[in-house]
Image (cartoon, rainbow, N blue to C red):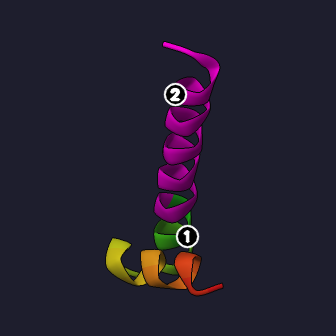
Amino acid sequence: MDDAVLEKIYQEKLEERIIATLAEKHGISLEDAMKAYYNS
């Protein structure tokens, strides 16, 4: 794997963790957390 692929994987995993944390902290569904994340 080259650096670009690794960076993309890292970014995707980071976004997953951020969305999961938003859902947990605010007591909302993952779908609502995704909407909040991508619309902010």
Asked whether 13 or 6 is in front, the reply is 6
- Is residue 32 located in the magenta-colored stretch of the structure? no
Task: Determine whether 23 is above or below 3 in the image.
Answer: below
Residue, x 62% and y 32% (percent of image)?
Answer: 7
Q: Which residue is mark 1?
A: 22
Residue, x 66% and y 85% (percent of image)?
Answer: 40
Q: Mark 1 packing: few (<14 Cα in 10 Å), some, or many (20+)? A: some
Side (left or right) of 17 relative to 30 = right
Asked whether 24 or 35 is in front, the reply is 35
Identity of the amino acid at label 2? Val
In percent of width and height, residue 9 lies at: 50, 34
Side (left or right) of 12 relative to 7 = left
In percent of width and height, residue 1 lies at: 48, 13
Q: Quadrant of residue 39?
A: bottom right
Please tell me the numbered disc located at residue 34.
none
Residue, x 52% and y 27% (percent of image)?
Answer: 5
Q: Mark 2 packing: few (<14 Cα in 10 Å), some, or many (20+)? A: few
Q: Quadrant of residue 37?
A: bottom right
* Magenta-tinted stretch: 1-20
- Is residue 15 located in the magenta-colored stretch of the structure? yes
Q: Which residue is mark 2?
A: 5
Which callout, 2 or 1, points at the residue further toward the start of the chain? 2
Task: Determine whether 21 is above or below 36 in the image.
Answer: above
